Image: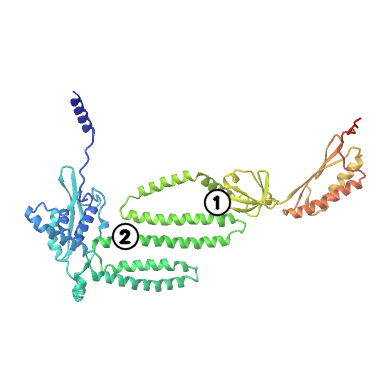
Amino acid sequence: MLRLLAALLLAVTLQGQTPTAPRDPLERSTPQSSVMRFLEACHAKDFNKASYYLDLRKMSPADRAKDGPELAKQLEDILDDTPFDIATLSRDSEGDQTDGLSPSLERLDTLHVDGQALNLYLERVQLKAGLQVWQVSADSVELIPEAHKLVAETPFEKKLPQVLVTTQFLSTPIWRWFALVLMGILLWMLAGALSRALVGIARPLMPLGELYFPVRVLLSIAGFRAAMEFAPPSALPRLFIERAMGLLFSLTLAWMATVVLDLFAARWHSRLDPRVQAISFSVLPLGRQILKLSLFLIAVLSVVSAWGYNTSTILAGLGVGGLAIALAAQKTLENLFGGVSVIGDRPVLVGDVCRFGDRTGTVMHIGLRSTRLRTPERTIICVPNSQFSTMALENISGRDKIWFHLKLNLRQDTTTDQLQSVLSSIEGILAASNKVEPGKIPVRFIDVGEYSLNLEVAAYVMTSDGDEFLAIQQDLLIRILQAVEKSGTALAVPMQEAVQPPQHQK
């Protein structure tokens, strides 16, 4: 009974599972991977393995074993000695569905014989149930011997010592590597002279001395790419060399963009107000670094995408990594965004005197993490930007004029004539000063207190300099006191309760 139950459970489990397609050990699932592994097998001199990438089903088993390796060797010669580019082949298991060919066909290479095009194709064939692979089509296999006749030594190679032609490295005659190295050195020297001349011509318009090296690299890459047409390596090395040059070319363009960015940033920095040091010393370098990193990231991703890789996975990984970093550096990011808020809103600038919370100080530096202020006691306070950006900031240096405000308490026995004299005298003192903006009613009698008659004086001193204000305020106060004395009255003194004398102990 238990065995029967176990058998039933196993049957149900197997029935619910989705069968997976068998995996091809030769990696022929896409056109590009099939040709890539074919060339790797050929370069390893394993032509027997390489023959499995050819559709030899039209041949008898005996002919397959006899002619298959030779056909693979001939196809390798064709692909290595013609301008064949592996990168043009599809990386999709379905092949390129937009090339106008049958869905099961993919163009491998095109040769020209007597003015006519000779096309070689890959075909998606089914070897067994569920296993579909890409192989060189059976019709194209029949054309390989004819196409191989086109691969012959050039007139230049016939004049070279045979050892340089027959000796190969990475399936490429050794003379081509020597030629590429020599041409690379010559092109580097020529590009140096040409880039130096170009930078010298542009120097009167803009100082572009830092562009010398990237311009030299770009010219060298362009020249070397043209030189490869004269001495092309075999297909696999050519693929990796071209990819390396493409990546270097893209990174050099990003490098040139960063140099131009630095030039514009330097010009903008020179035109900034010296008081806006927060922008010039904090935001500008940070923004420049972020833009530089973005340029290089775009350059790398564009090249990787051109190679046929899916960049969405890389971007997703960067997003997850960025989220993890953001969670780990939460406090740092709070200070960073707080600094951006302070720098962007600019409630205070470097050198401003401000009141923050219950403290007062002069702003010394506004950074991306904190703000430093010097207090009147000459100490330095460092406030994290996450706190500083949420405080009520009073910019004292932002005043265009300073309020002069005074309350006078005259003696309660002051007569109305004396009171009127004090009011008129103070109003005249304020009106006589060219540094005072008195307003409509600068002096007013506001109320009668318990022990005094209370006056209020309010006017603006037309200066934003604190020291100048103190000097003007001092002069005004002295003249107001003189006016009170001249009127015959005096300032009130608060009434004090009588203090009982201490009793002596008996």
Q: Residue furthest front?
A: 506
Residue occupying image coordinates x 57% and y 51%: 343
In the rendered view, tell whether residue 404 sits above or below residue 44: above
The quarter of the picture where residue 419 lies is top right
Q: Nearer the viewer, residue 365 or 145?
A: 365
- The image position of residue 55, as x and y in percent, is 14, 53
Residue mark closest to the camera, 2 vs 1: 1
- Mark 1: which secondary structure? loop
Q: Residue furthest top?
A: 1
Marks 1 and 2: in contact by CB < 8 Å?
no
Quarter of the image that includes the N terminus: top left
Relative to 150, 288 lies left or right: right
Query: Distance between the Cα atoms at labels 2 and 1?
Result: 40 Å
Instruction: Classify mark 2: residues with Cα within 10 Å, few (<14), some (14-19) or many (20+).
Output: some
Amino acid, disc 1: Leu
- The dot on residue 290 is none
Q: Nearer the viewer, residue 17 or 448?
A: 17
Instruction: Classify mark 1: residues with Cα within 10 Å, few (<14), some (14-19) or many (20+).
Output: many
- The image position of residue 439, as x and y in percent, is 78, 47
- Tell me, what colour scheme is on the image? rainbow
- Mark 2: which secondary structure? helix
Relative to 241, 342 lies left or right: right
- The image position of residue 276, as x and y in percent, is 60, 56
Pointer 2 or 1: first along the chain: 2
Amino acid, disc 2: Arg
The quarter of the picture where residue 234 lies is bottom left
- The dot on residue 243 is 2
* Residue, disc 1: 368
Q: Nearer the viewer, residue 192 or 325?
A: 325
Quarter of the image that includes the C terminus: top right
